[in-house]
Amino acid sequence: MGEAIVQLEDVWVSLDGVTVLEDISLTLYEREFVALIGPNGGGKTTLLRVILGLVKPFRGVVRVFGQSPEEGRRWIGYLPQYVSFDREFPITVLEVVLMGRYRGPFKPYGEEDLEAAMRALETVGMAEYSHRRIGHLSGGELQRVLIARALAREPRLLLLDEPMSNIDPEMRESLYRLLVELKERMAILLVSHDIAAVSTYVEKVVCLNRRISYYGSREEVLRGLGEAYRHEIELLERGYPWRCRR
Amino acid sequence: MMLPLFLRNALLASLLVSVASGVVGAYVVVKRIVSIGGGISHATFGGIGLGILLSLNPLLTAIPFSLASALAMAVITRRGKVSEDAAIGILWALGMALGVLFISLKRGYVPELSAYLFGSILTVPTHELQLMAILDLIILLVVILFFRELLNLCFDEEFSAVVGVPVELLYMALLCLISLSVVVLVRAVGVILTIALLSIPASISLRLIHSLRGMMILSTLLSLTLLLLGLALSYILDLPPGALTVLLSIGAFTLAYIRSR
Protein backbone atom coordinates (compact mmCIF):
# COMPACT_ATOMS: atom_id res chain seq x y z
CA MET A 1 0.00 0.00 0.00
CA GLY A 2 1.47 3.34 -1.04
CA GLU A 3 1.14 6.78 0.40
CA ALA A 4 -2.31 8.07 1.40
CA ILE A 5 -3.42 10.66 -1.16
CA VAL A 6 -6.99 11.42 -0.13
CA GLN A 7 -8.19 11.36 3.45
CA LEU A 8 -11.73 12.00 4.59
CA GLU A 9 -12.46 11.92 8.28
CA ASP A 10 -15.98 12.00 9.67
CA VAL A 11 -17.26 14.07 6.76
CA TRP A 12 -20.87 15.28 6.76
CA VAL A 13 -22.40 17.17 3.86
CA SER A 14 -25.78 18.77 3.42
CA LEU A 15 -27.21 20.29 0.26
CA ASP A 16 -30.16 22.68 0.52
CA GLY A 17 -30.69 21.61 4.12
CA VAL A 18 -30.79 17.89 3.33
CA THR A 19 -27.98 15.73 4.65
CA VAL A 20 -26.60 13.79 1.71
CA LEU A 21 -23.40 12.37 3.18
CA GLU A 22 -23.05 11.14 6.75
CA ASP A 23 -20.00 10.15 8.70
CA ILE A 24 -17.76 9.44 5.71
CA SER A 25 -14.28 8.28 6.57
CA LEU A 26 -12.26 7.05 3.64
CA THR A 27 -8.61 6.88 2.61
CA LEU A 28 -7.34 6.45 -0.92
CA TYR A 29 -3.77 5.34 -1.57
CA GLU A 30 -1.41 5.82 -4.47
CA ARG A 31 -2.07 3.68 -7.56
CA GLU A 32 -5.26 2.19 -6.18
CA PHE A 33 -8.12 1.35 -8.52
CA VAL A 34 -11.28 1.89 -6.50
CA ALA A 35 -14.90 1.65 -7.55
CA LEU A 36 -17.52 3.80 -5.88
CA ILE A 37 -20.91 2.22 -6.25
CA GLY A 38 -24.34 2.76 -4.77
CA PRO A 39 -27.91 3.68 -5.64
CA ASN A 40 -28.90 6.89 -7.42
CA GLY A 41 -29.01 9.77 -4.99
CA GLY A 42 -26.65 7.90 -2.70
CA GLY A 43 -24.16 10.77 -2.80
CA LYS A 44 -21.51 9.36 -5.16
CA THR A 45 -21.14 12.51 -7.24
CA THR A 46 -21.29 14.67 -4.12
CA LEU A 47 -18.42 12.68 -2.63
CA LEU A 48 -16.31 13.41 -5.72
CA ARG A 49 -17.25 17.08 -5.48
CA VAL A 50 -16.15 17.11 -1.85
CA ILE A 51 -12.74 15.71 -2.83
CA LEU A 52 -12.54 18.38 -5.55
CA GLY A 53 -13.40 21.18 -3.12
CA LEU A 54 -16.58 22.08 -5.02
CA VAL A 55 -18.76 21.17 -2.04
CA LYS A 56 -17.86 22.06 1.54
CA PRO A 57 -18.68 19.60 4.31
CA PHE A 58 -20.34 21.08 7.39
CA ARG A 59 -18.36 18.71 9.53
CA GLY A 60 -15.21 16.69 9.16
CA VAL A 61 -11.81 17.00 7.53
CA VAL A 62 -10.82 16.54 3.90
CA ARG A 63 -7.16 16.33 2.91
CA VAL A 64 -6.07 15.91 -0.69
CA PHE A 65 -2.38 15.17 -1.15
CA GLY A 66 -1.93 16.44 2.39
CA GLN A 67 -3.47 19.80 1.53
CA SER A 68 -6.88 21.42 1.34
CA PRO A 69 -8.98 20.22 -1.64
CA GLU A 70 -8.53 23.58 -3.39
CA GLU A 71 -4.77 23.22 -3.16
CA GLY A 72 -4.51 19.50 -3.68
CA ARG A 73 -6.86 19.26 -6.64
CA ARG A 74 -4.17 20.39 -9.02
CA TRP A 75 -3.05 16.76 -8.94
CA ILE A 76 -6.50 15.49 -9.79
CA GLY A 77 -7.84 14.71 -13.24
CA TYR A 78 -11.63 14.89 -13.31
CA LEU A 79 -14.22 13.48 -15.66
CA PRO A 80 -17.63 14.96 -14.81
CA GLN A 81 -20.76 12.91 -15.18
CA TYR A 82 -21.97 12.65 -18.74
CA VAL A 83 -24.03 15.79 -18.81
CA SER A 84 -25.35 16.13 -22.31
CA PHE A 85 -22.63 18.40 -23.63
CA ASP A 86 -23.94 20.84 -26.16
CA ARG A 87 -22.95 19.09 -29.38
CA GLU A 88 -23.33 22.30 -31.30
CA PHE A 89 -20.69 24.03 -29.19
CA PRO A 90 -18.03 25.55 -31.44
CA ILE A 91 -14.97 23.95 -29.87
CA THR A 92 -12.37 21.50 -31.18
CA VAL A 93 -11.06 18.37 -29.50
CA LEU A 94 -7.69 20.03 -28.86
CA GLU A 95 -9.31 23.11 -27.31
CA VAL A 96 -11.26 20.85 -24.95
CA VAL A 97 -8.18 18.90 -23.91
CA LEU A 98 -6.19 22.11 -23.38
CA MET A 99 -8.73 23.08 -20.70
CA GLY A 100 -6.97 20.48 -18.59
CA ARG A 101 -3.77 22.54 -18.85
CA TYR A 102 -5.31 25.74 -17.54
CA ARG A 103 -3.04 27.29 -14.92
CA GLY A 104 -4.58 30.70 -14.37
CA PRO A 105 -5.31 33.99 -16.10
CA PHE A 106 -2.57 35.60 -18.19
CA LYS A 107 -0.75 32.28 -18.44
CA PRO A 108 -1.44 31.32 -22.03
CA TYR A 109 -0.97 27.73 -23.18
CA GLY A 110 2.60 27.13 -24.28
CA GLU A 111 4.46 24.52 -26.29
CA GLU A 112 4.64 22.31 -23.22
CA ASP A 113 0.86 22.41 -22.75
CA LEU A 114 0.28 21.57 -26.38
CA GLU A 115 2.59 18.58 -26.10
CA ALA A 116 0.92 17.38 -22.90
CA ALA A 117 -2.50 17.70 -24.56
CA MET A 118 -1.35 15.71 -27.59
CA ARG A 119 0.23 13.04 -25.37
CA ALA A 120 -3.06 12.72 -23.50
CA LEU A 121 -4.93 12.37 -26.79
CA GLU A 122 -2.48 9.68 -27.90
CA THR A 123 -3.00 7.81 -24.64
CA VAL A 124 -6.74 7.58 -25.32
CA GLY A 125 -6.17 6.91 -29.03
CA MET A 126 -7.74 10.14 -30.27
CA ALA A 127 -4.69 12.07 -31.52
CA GLU A 128 -5.80 12.16 -35.14
CA TYR A 129 -9.08 13.78 -34.06
CA SER A 130 -7.41 16.81 -32.48
CA HIS A 131 -8.83 19.33 -34.92
CA ARG A 132 -12.30 17.82 -35.14
CA ARG A 133 -15.21 19.66 -33.71
CA ILE A 134 -16.63 17.84 -30.70
CA GLY A 135 -20.05 17.71 -32.34
CA HIS A 136 -18.66 15.23 -34.86
CA LEU A 137 -17.69 12.63 -32.26
CA SER A 138 -19.62 9.60 -31.07
CA GLY A 139 -20.50 9.26 -27.39
CA GLY A 140 -17.55 6.95 -26.76
CA GLU A 141 -15.13 9.20 -28.63
CA LEU A 142 -16.29 12.24 -26.69
CA GLN A 143 -15.81 10.33 -23.44
CA ARG A 144 -12.24 9.49 -24.47
CA VAL A 145 -11.56 13.14 -25.25
CA LEU A 146 -12.89 14.14 -21.84
CA ILE A 147 -10.63 11.53 -20.22
CA ALA A 148 -7.74 13.00 -22.22
CA ARG A 149 -8.67 16.41 -20.80
CA ALA A 150 -8.38 14.93 -17.30
CA LEU A 151 -5.07 13.25 -18.19
CA ALA A 152 -3.64 16.45 -19.67
CA ARG A 153 -3.22 17.70 -16.11
CA GLU A 154 -0.77 14.85 -15.57
CA PRO A 155 -2.72 13.84 -12.49
CA ARG A 156 -1.80 11.49 -9.67
CA LEU A 157 -5.48 10.76 -9.05
CA LEU A 158 -8.21 10.31 -11.62
CA LEU A 159 -11.84 10.87 -10.57
CA LEU A 160 -14.25 9.41 -13.11
CA ASP A 161 -17.97 9.97 -12.66
CA GLU A 162 -19.83 7.23 -14.50
CA PRO A 163 -17.48 7.10 -17.48
CA MET A 164 -19.28 4.11 -18.94
CA SER A 165 -22.74 5.61 -19.34
CA ASN A 166 -23.83 6.51 -22.87
CA ILE A 167 -21.19 4.26 -24.40
CA ASP A 168 -21.72 1.15 -26.50
CA PRO A 169 -20.46 -2.16 -25.04
CA GLU A 170 -17.42 -2.51 -27.33
CA MET A 171 -16.17 0.94 -26.49
CA ARG A 172 -16.78 0.18 -22.82
CA GLU A 173 -14.49 -2.83 -22.97
CA SER A 174 -11.66 -0.82 -24.51
CA LEU A 175 -12.17 2.01 -22.02
CA TYR A 176 -11.77 -0.45 -19.15
CA ARG A 177 -8.56 -1.71 -20.73
CA LEU A 178 -7.35 1.88 -20.92
CA LEU A 179 -8.11 2.39 -17.24
CA VAL A 180 -6.21 -0.75 -16.28
CA GLU A 181 -3.22 0.67 -18.18
CA LEU A 182 -3.55 4.08 -16.52
CA LYS A 183 -3.71 2.47 -13.11
CA GLU A 184 0.02 1.73 -13.38
CA ARG A 185 0.66 5.47 -13.25
CA MET A 186 -2.07 6.91 -11.00
CA ALA A 187 -4.83 6.15 -8.55
CA ILE A 188 -8.33 5.91 -10.01
CA LEU A 189 -11.65 6.42 -8.28
CA LEU A 190 -14.44 5.32 -10.56
CA VAL A 191 -18.13 5.92 -9.98
CA SER A 192 -20.21 3.20 -11.56
CA HIS A 193 -23.52 1.44 -11.65
CA ASP A 194 -22.16 -1.57 -13.40
CA ILE A 195 -21.12 -3.87 -10.55
CA ALA A 196 -20.43 -6.82 -12.82
CA ALA A 197 -17.93 -4.95 -14.99
CA VAL A 198 -16.40 -3.09 -12.09
CA SER A 199 -15.68 -6.26 -10.16
CA THR A 200 -13.50 -7.61 -12.98
CA TYR A 201 -11.13 -4.67 -12.99
CA VAL A 202 -10.97 -2.86 -9.68
CA GLU A 203 -9.13 -3.71 -6.50
CA LYS A 204 -11.35 -2.08 -3.95
CA VAL A 205 -15.02 -1.26 -3.74
CA VAL A 206 -16.76 1.46 -1.77
CA CYS A 207 -20.51 1.12 -1.50
CA LEU A 208 -22.10 4.43 -0.70
CA ASN A 209 -25.65 5.13 0.27
CA ARG A 210 -25.37 8.36 2.19
CA ARG A 211 -23.08 6.41 4.50
CA ILE A 212 -20.34 4.06 3.47
CA SER A 213 -22.08 0.75 3.86
CA TYR A 214 -19.22 -1.40 2.55
CA TYR A 215 -15.58 -0.72 2.03
CA GLY A 216 -12.90 -3.24 1.34
CA SER A 217 -11.07 -5.35 -1.16
CA ARG A 218 -13.02 -6.57 -4.14
CA GLU A 219 -13.16 -10.19 -2.96
CA GLU A 220 -14.17 -9.31 0.55
CA VAL A 221 -16.85 -6.92 -0.57
CA LEU A 222 -18.21 -9.03 -3.40
CA ARG A 223 -19.16 -11.80 -1.05
CA GLY A 224 -21.74 -9.77 0.78
CA LEU A 225 -22.17 -7.09 -1.78
CA GLY A 226 -24.31 -8.71 -4.47
CA GLU A 227 -26.89 -9.51 -1.90
CA ALA A 228 -26.83 -6.23 -0.02
CA TYR A 229 -26.58 -3.94 -3.01
CA ARG A 230 -29.50 -5.60 -4.72
CA HIS A 231 -31.41 -5.40 -1.49
CA GLU A 232 -30.86 -1.67 -1.23
CA ILE A 233 -31.81 -1.07 -4.83
CA GLU A 234 -34.99 -3.06 -4.41
CA LEU A 235 -35.95 -1.09 -1.36
CA LEU A 236 -35.31 2.13 -3.21
CA GLU A 237 -37.43 1.03 -6.12
CA ARG A 238 -40.26 0.19 -3.78
CA GLY A 239 -40.01 3.63 -2.30
CA TYR A 240 -38.58 2.91 1.13
CA PRO A 241 -35.35 4.87 0.94
CA TRP A 242 -35.29 5.43 4.67
CA ARG A 243 -34.76 1.74 5.27
CA CYS A 244 -31.33 1.87 3.62
CA ARG A 245 -29.86 4.16 6.17
CA ARG A 246 -28.07 1.43 7.99
CA MET B 1 -17.87 62.62 -51.43
CA MET B 2 -19.25 64.19 -48.28
CA LEU B 3 -21.94 62.24 -46.52
CA PRO B 4 -24.57 64.13 -44.59
CA LEU B 5 -23.76 63.97 -40.86
CA PHE B 6 -26.80 61.90 -39.91
CA LEU B 7 -25.92 59.28 -42.53
CA ARG B 8 -22.24 59.21 -41.59
CA ASN B 9 -23.21 58.76 -37.94
CA ALA B 10 -25.74 56.07 -38.82
CA LEU B 11 -23.06 54.11 -40.70
CA LEU B 12 -20.55 54.46 -37.87
CA ALA B 13 -23.22 53.49 -35.34
CA SER B 14 -24.00 50.40 -37.41
CA LEU B 15 -20.34 49.42 -37.30
CA LEU B 16 -20.08 49.91 -33.53
CA VAL B 17 -23.36 48.10 -32.93
CA SER B 18 -22.30 45.14 -35.05
CA VAL B 19 -19.08 44.62 -33.06
CA ALA B 20 -20.94 44.46 -29.74
CA SER B 21 -23.68 42.29 -31.17
CA GLY B 22 -21.29 39.90 -32.91
CA VAL B 23 -18.84 39.40 -30.06
CA VAL B 24 -21.22 39.32 -27.09
CA GLY B 25 -23.95 37.60 -29.13
CA ALA B 26 -21.64 34.63 -29.70
CA TYR B 27 -21.42 34.09 -25.94
CA VAL B 28 -25.14 34.65 -25.42
CA VAL B 29 -25.92 31.95 -27.97
CA VAL B 30 -23.36 29.30 -27.02
CA LYS B 31 -23.95 29.74 -23.28
CA ARG B 32 -27.71 29.63 -23.97
CA ILE B 33 -28.53 32.73 -21.99
CA VAL B 34 -30.68 34.47 -24.57
CA SER B 35 -33.52 35.02 -22.12
CA ILE B 36 -31.13 36.42 -19.53
CA GLY B 37 -30.01 38.84 -22.24
CA GLY B 38 -33.65 39.74 -22.86
CA GLY B 39 -34.13 40.36 -19.16
CA ILE B 40 -31.08 42.60 -18.90
CA SER B 41 -31.98 44.63 -21.97
CA HIS B 42 -35.51 45.33 -20.76
CA ALA B 43 -34.30 46.10 -17.24
CA THR B 44 -32.02 48.70 -18.83
CA PHE B 45 -35.10 50.73 -19.71
CA GLY B 46 -35.24 51.81 -16.07
CA GLY B 47 -31.88 53.54 -16.50
CA ILE B 48 -33.05 55.23 -19.67
CA GLY B 49 -36.14 56.54 -17.90
CA LEU B 50 -33.93 57.86 -15.11
CA GLY B 51 -31.78 59.74 -17.64
CA ILE B 52 -34.85 61.30 -19.22
CA LEU B 53 -36.19 62.32 -15.80
CA LEU B 54 -32.90 63.90 -14.73
CA SER B 55 -32.32 65.45 -18.17
CA LEU B 56 -29.06 63.54 -18.51
CA ASN B 57 -27.99 61.49 -21.49
CA PRO B 58 -30.11 58.33 -21.11
CA LEU B 59 -27.31 56.12 -22.42
CA LEU B 60 -25.08 57.29 -19.56
CA THR B 61 -27.65 56.53 -16.86
CA ALA B 62 -28.44 53.25 -18.61
CA ILE B 63 -24.93 51.91 -17.97
CA PRO B 64 -25.03 51.64 -14.14
CA PHE B 65 -28.65 50.49 -14.28
CA SER B 66 -27.88 47.77 -16.77
CA LEU B 67 -24.78 46.62 -14.88
CA ALA B 68 -26.75 46.51 -11.63
CA SER B 69 -29.46 44.40 -13.22
CA ALA B 70 -26.82 42.00 -14.61
CA LEU B 71 -25.23 41.62 -11.18
CA ALA B 72 -28.61 41.16 -9.55
CA MET B 73 -29.45 38.53 -12.15
CA ALA B 74 -26.20 36.68 -11.47
CA VAL B 75 -26.55 36.81 -7.69
CA ILE B 76 -30.22 35.85 -7.57
CA THR B 77 -29.92 32.96 -9.99
CA ARG B 78 -26.66 31.57 -8.58
CA ARG B 79 -26.96 32.15 -4.87
CA GLY B 80 -30.61 32.55 -4.07
CA LYS B 81 -33.44 30.10 -4.16
CA VAL B 82 -35.23 31.84 -7.00
CA SER B 83 -35.30 30.03 -10.32
CA GLU B 84 -33.50 31.66 -13.20
CA ASP B 85 -36.77 31.83 -15.06
CA ALA B 86 -38.57 33.77 -12.37
CA ALA B 87 -35.59 36.06 -11.72
CA ILE B 88 -35.55 37.05 -15.40
CA GLY B 89 -39.25 37.84 -15.37
CA ILE B 90 -39.03 39.90 -12.19
CA LEU B 91 -36.03 42.02 -13.21
CA TRP B 92 -37.42 42.45 -16.71
CA ALA B 93 -40.67 43.86 -15.32
CA LEU B 94 -38.96 45.86 -12.57
CA GLY B 95 -36.77 47.75 -15.04
CA MET B 96 -39.62 48.47 -17.41
CA ALA B 97 -41.91 49.62 -14.57
CA LEU B 98 -39.24 51.93 -13.15
CA GLY B 99 -38.63 53.33 -16.63
CA VAL B 100 -42.30 54.10 -17.13
CA LEU B 101 -42.51 55.63 -13.67
CA PHE B 102 -39.46 57.87 -14.14
CA ILE B 103 -40.70 59.09 -17.49
CA SER B 104 -44.17 59.85 -16.16
CA LEU B 105 -42.57 61.96 -13.40
CA LYS B 106 -40.90 64.07 -16.05
CA ARG B 107 -43.10 67.06 -16.80
CA GLY B 108 -43.83 67.95 -20.34
CA TYR B 109 -43.26 66.24 -23.64
CA VAL B 110 -40.77 63.37 -23.84
CA PRO B 111 -39.60 63.35 -27.41
CA GLU B 112 -36.95 60.61 -27.40
CA LEU B 113 -38.95 57.84 -25.82
CA SER B 114 -39.58 55.73 -28.89
CA ALA B 115 -35.94 56.18 -29.95
CA TYR B 116 -34.91 54.17 -26.88
CA LEU B 117 -37.74 51.67 -27.08
CA PHE B 118 -37.45 50.83 -30.74
CA GLY B 119 -34.17 52.40 -31.82
CA SER B 120 -33.36 55.39 -33.95
CA ILE B 121 -30.10 54.84 -35.72
CA LEU B 122 -30.63 57.86 -37.97
CA THR B 123 -30.43 60.33 -35.08
CA VAL B 124 -27.32 59.21 -33.20
CA PRO B 125 -25.36 62.28 -32.08
CA THR B 126 -21.57 62.20 -32.32
CA HIS B 127 -20.98 62.16 -28.56
CA GLU B 128 -23.04 58.98 -28.31
CA LEU B 129 -20.87 57.41 -30.98
CA GLN B 130 -17.88 58.12 -28.78
CA LEU B 131 -19.58 56.46 -25.83
CA MET B 132 -20.47 53.43 -27.95
CA ALA B 133 -16.87 53.18 -29.18
CA ILE B 134 -15.55 53.21 -25.60
CA LEU B 135 -17.98 50.47 -24.58
CA ASP B 136 -16.96 48.41 -27.63
CA LEU B 137 -13.32 48.77 -26.63
CA ILE B 138 -14.03 47.62 -23.08
CA ILE B 139 -15.93 44.61 -24.40
CA LEU B 140 -13.14 43.68 -26.82
CA LEU B 141 -10.47 44.11 -24.17
CA VAL B 142 -12.24 41.82 -21.69
CA VAL B 143 -12.90 39.21 -24.38
CA ILE B 144 -9.31 39.25 -25.63
CA LEU B 145 -7.80 39.07 -22.13
CA PHE B 146 -10.13 36.34 -20.88
CA PHE B 147 -10.91 34.45 -24.04
CA ARG B 148 -9.85 31.04 -22.68
CA GLU B 149 -11.64 31.57 -19.39
CA LEU B 150 -14.88 32.60 -21.08
CA LEU B 151 -14.66 29.69 -23.52
CA ASN B 152 -14.14 27.25 -20.66
CA LEU B 153 -16.96 28.80 -18.65
CA CYS B 154 -19.38 28.45 -21.53
CA PHE B 155 -18.37 24.89 -22.39
CA ASP B 156 -18.07 23.23 -18.99
CA GLU B 157 -18.48 25.21 -15.80
CA GLU B 158 -17.84 22.37 -13.41
CA PHE B 159 -14.54 21.37 -14.95
CA SER B 160 -13.52 25.02 -15.24
CA ALA B 161 -14.07 25.46 -11.51
CA VAL B 162 -11.90 22.45 -10.77
CA VAL B 163 -8.96 23.77 -12.80
CA GLY B 164 -9.20 27.12 -11.03
CA VAL B 165 -11.25 29.34 -13.34
CA PRO B 166 -13.11 31.82 -11.05
CA VAL B 167 -16.44 30.67 -12.39
CA GLU B 168 -18.82 32.84 -10.36
CA LEU B 169 -16.86 36.02 -10.96
CA LEU B 170 -16.51 35.28 -14.64
CA TYR B 171 -20.22 34.59 -15.01
CA MET B 172 -20.92 38.01 -13.51
CA ALA B 173 -18.42 39.53 -15.92
CA LEU B 174 -20.14 37.82 -18.82
CA LEU B 175 -23.53 39.24 -17.80
CA CYS B 176 -21.88 42.66 -17.45
CA LEU B 177 -20.59 42.33 -21.01
CA ILE B 178 -24.20 41.76 -22.05
CA SER B 179 -25.17 44.94 -20.17
CA LEU B 180 -22.57 47.03 -21.95
CA SER B 181 -23.53 45.60 -25.31
CA VAL B 182 -27.20 46.39 -24.62
CA VAL B 183 -26.25 50.04 -24.10
CA VAL B 184 -24.37 50.00 -27.40
CA LEU B 185 -27.30 48.36 -29.18
CA VAL B 186 -30.12 50.49 -27.77
CA ARG B 187 -29.69 53.24 -30.34
CA ALA B 188 -29.96 50.79 -33.22
CA VAL B 189 -32.95 48.67 -32.27
CA GLY B 190 -34.15 49.88 -28.85
CA VAL B 191 -34.34 47.95 -25.58
CA ILE B 192 -37.24 45.88 -26.86
CA LEU B 193 -35.40 44.53 -29.88
CA THR B 194 -31.76 44.37 -28.71
CA ILE B 195 -32.12 40.70 -27.99
CA ALA B 196 -32.64 40.14 -31.71
CA LEU B 197 -29.17 41.44 -32.53
CA LEU B 198 -27.65 39.51 -29.63
CA SER B 199 -29.16 36.22 -30.68
CA ILE B 200 -29.93 36.06 -34.40
CA PRO B 201 -26.58 36.84 -36.11
CA ALA B 202 -24.74 34.53 -33.69
CA SER B 203 -27.30 31.77 -34.21
CA ILE B 204 -26.79 32.02 -37.97
CA SER B 205 -22.99 31.86 -37.62
CA LEU B 206 -23.20 28.87 -35.30
CA ARG B 207 -24.76 26.97 -38.20
CA LEU B 208 -21.98 27.98 -40.58
CA ILE B 209 -18.77 28.07 -38.56
CA HIS B 210 -17.08 25.85 -36.01
CA SER B 211 -14.96 28.06 -33.80
CA LEU B 212 -15.92 30.72 -31.30
CA ARG B 213 -13.52 33.27 -32.80
CA GLY B 214 -14.88 32.60 -36.25
CA MET B 215 -18.41 32.92 -34.93
CA MET B 216 -17.63 36.34 -33.48
CA ILE B 217 -16.17 37.62 -36.72
CA LEU B 218 -18.94 36.22 -38.89
CA SER B 219 -21.68 37.46 -36.53
CA THR B 220 -20.15 40.93 -36.61
CA LEU B 221 -20.12 40.94 -40.41
CA LEU B 222 -23.67 39.58 -40.53
CA SER B 223 -24.90 42.23 -38.08
CA LEU B 224 -23.28 44.97 -40.09
CA THR B 225 -24.78 43.70 -43.35
CA LEU B 226 -28.23 43.38 -41.81
CA LEU B 227 -28.05 46.84 -40.25
CA LEU B 228 -26.99 48.41 -43.54
CA LEU B 229 -29.69 46.54 -45.46
CA GLY B 230 -32.18 47.71 -42.84
CA LEU B 231 -31.04 51.29 -43.33
CA ALA B 232 -31.29 51.05 -47.12
CA LEU B 233 -34.73 49.46 -46.99
CA SER B 234 -35.96 52.04 -44.52
CA TYR B 235 -34.90 54.76 -46.94
CA ILE B 236 -36.72 53.10 -49.83
CA LEU B 237 -39.86 52.12 -47.94
CA ASP B 238 -39.89 54.98 -45.42
CA LEU B 239 -40.25 52.54 -42.52
CA PRO B 240 -38.30 52.36 -39.22
CA PRO B 241 -34.82 50.81 -39.80
CA GLY B 242 -34.62 49.01 -36.44
CA ALA B 243 -37.70 46.90 -37.03
CA LEU B 244 -36.67 46.23 -40.63
CA THR B 245 -33.23 45.05 -39.48
CA VAL B 246 -34.82 42.62 -37.03
CA LEU B 247 -37.18 41.25 -39.67
CA LEU B 248 -34.32 40.90 -42.16
CA SER B 249 -32.31 39.04 -39.50
CA ILE B 250 -35.11 36.60 -38.93
CA GLY B 251 -35.39 36.12 -42.69
CA ALA B 252 -31.64 35.41 -42.88
CA PHE B 253 -31.88 32.95 -39.99
CA THR B 254 -34.72 31.12 -41.72
CA LEU B 255 -32.65 30.84 -44.90
CA ALA B 256 -29.61 29.55 -43.00
CA TYR B 257 -31.80 27.08 -41.14
CA ILE B 258 -33.38 25.69 -44.29
CA ARG B 259 -30.02 25.46 -46.08
CA SER B 260 -28.14 23.72 -43.27
CA ARG B 261 -30.85 21.23 -42.39
Image (cartoon, coloured by chain):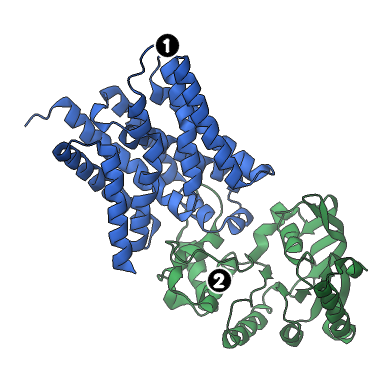
The image quadrant that residue A18 belongs to is bottom right
Identity of the residue drawn at 17% across and 31% down: B7
Q: Percent from the top left, x then y, of residue A111?
A: 45, 62
Secondary element type, mark 1: loop
Picture layout, residue A215 above or below residue B244: below
Chain letter behind tag 1: B
Which amino acid does the dot numbered 2 rest on?
Answer: Ala
Q: Foreground: B248 or B145?
A: B248
Residue position marked by numbered label 1 in the rendering: B107
Chain designation of label 2: A
Residue B209 visible? The answer is no
Mark 2 Cα-neighbour bin, 10 Å: few <14, some 14–19, many ≥20: many
Expressed as whole percent of the image width and height from the top left, the position of residue B75 reads 62, 39
Coordinates of residue B31 in the picture (x, y in percent): 49, 53
Task: Tell me which chain appears green.
Answer: A
User: CA gap, disc 2 to disc 1?
Assistant: 65 Å
Q: Which residue is mark 2?
A: A148
Where the C terminus of chain B falls, by quadrant? bottom left
Picture coordinates of residue A218, whole percent (x, y): 82, 83
Q: Quadrant of the N terminus of chain B?
A: top left
Residue A241, can we see it?
yes
Q: In blue, which chain?
A: B
Please, what secondary structure does the residue beneath circle 2 have?
A: helix
